[in-house]
Image (tube, helix red, strand yellow):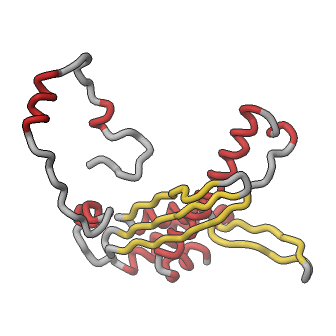
Amino acid sequence: MHDPFSDAPHPAATAARPTGPQPEVLEQLDAQPAPQLPARASDYADLFASVPRAPRDRAAMLRAAEWVGSLLGEDAIYSWEAAGKRGRTLIEGPTIGLAYALASEWGDTATRALLIERTSQRAKFRGEFIDLQRRTLVVREYVFGLSPPPGKFADGEQRIRWETMQEQSAASKAVRGAILAGLPVWFVDAAIR
């Protein structure tokens, strides 16, 4: 089955095709009524149907989360200080690397980021985390303020590069939020203890 969240084209889109007009094929298609697709309960119905429901072994999942946390070490958490009206504040939380590693260990999941809106000053992304065994979809939206490109990024190709980096950062934050909201707190906490 082709991964519907992959950026790669579907295998059918890249298959070798005969070149030039194929009138006999078009005539056959014109002679047949257009097929009616059945209404679908969800865009994810095929994904949900592809994975059998089975209980997860929580003790094994705890060990897996602890293992991931021990491998990532300090890279599991981002942390920096920010100055504000009330003084310095420590900002920290699980990284996107930890989120993806935990989703992989949790198993039978899918993620994606969708660009919802883009203006010259902001980008709005929707992060989705799908747990195929529990048949759940968690959605988190993230609005990212786009800053003007600094110095060497101000012109031409470098400007596009700057904008792409900002959009990738926003998409990452939206997906991270969806994954961490979709995984049980006890599972995430086990990795960062």
163 vs 25, nearest the viewer: 25
Q: Residue at x 35, y 64 (%)?
A: 108
Whether residue 71 is visible to the viewer of this picture, yes or no, is no
Whether residue 46 is visible to the viewer of this picture, yes or no, is yes
Relative image position of residue 3 (x, y in whole percent): 34, 50
Q: Is residue 22 left or right of residue 76?
A: left
Q: Is residue 96 left or right of residue 42?
A: right
Q: Is residue 34 left or right of residue 93?
A: left
Q: Residue at x 50, y 61 (%)?
A: 101
Q: Quadrant of the C terminus?
A: bottom right
Image quadrant in which you'd find residue 111? bottom left
Image label count: 0
43 vs 72, nearest the viewer: 43
Image quadrant in which you'd find residue 31? top left
182 vs 125, nearest the viewer: 125
Instruction: Identify whether 78 is placed above or below 115.
Output: below
Relative image position of residue 78 (x, y in whole percent): 70, 66
Q: Residue at x 18, y 61 (%)?
A: 38
Instruction: Identify whether 44 is placed above or below 189.
Output: above
Relative image position of residue 56 (x, y in whole percent): 33, 76
Relative image position of residue 47 (x, y in whole percent): 29, 61
Q: Residue at x 55, y 56 (%)?
A: 115
